[in-house]
Amino acid sequence: MARKWARARVEHVDVEQVAGELFAAVLGSGPDLITVVVSTSGDRVRLTAVGPEDLPARQTHGPGRRIIAALSARSGVTPDGCGLWAQLTMETT
């Protein structure tokens, strides 16, 4: 569901994969609620997925995180340690 939601808001070839990996990484910590946010500024799009508790190292450094890093211009852990973010750059014509 997060993948389709992000795709409806952002036209980027990797947005569905990145949104899915962000969601899955946070879901791996077992939260009851995950918040996914899409922020835009100029040609940049930032996707963020956050849960209510700190993410374990497996979620912040696991295979999903490596996929996110490979598909995005920048990525990281949220300042509170409860989520992950990825920044995509849109092509301008």
Image: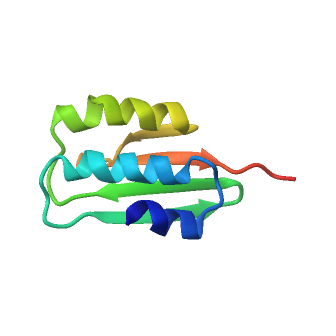
Answer with left or right where residue 36 lies relative to residue 57.
right
Say whether residue 33 is visible.
yes
Image coords of residue 44 (percent x, y)? 64, 53
Image coords of residue 16 (percent x, y)? 50, 54
The quarter of the image holding the N terminus is: bottom left
Residue drawn at point x = 46 percent, y = 47 percent: 18
Residue drawn at point x = 15 percent, y = 38 percent: 56
Residue drawn at point x = 39 percent, y = 52 percent: 20
Q: Name the image colouring.
A: rainbow
Image coords of residue 87 (percent x, y)? 54, 47
Looking at the image, residue 6 lies above or below residue 68 = below
Say whether residue 80 is visible.
no
Count of number-bearing discs: 0
Looking at the image, residue 20 lies above or below residue 32 = above
Looking at the image, residue 66 lies above or below residue 22 = above
Nearer to the camera, 66 or 86: 66
Image coords of residue 79 (percent x, y)? 31, 47
Nearer to the camera, 70 or 50: 70
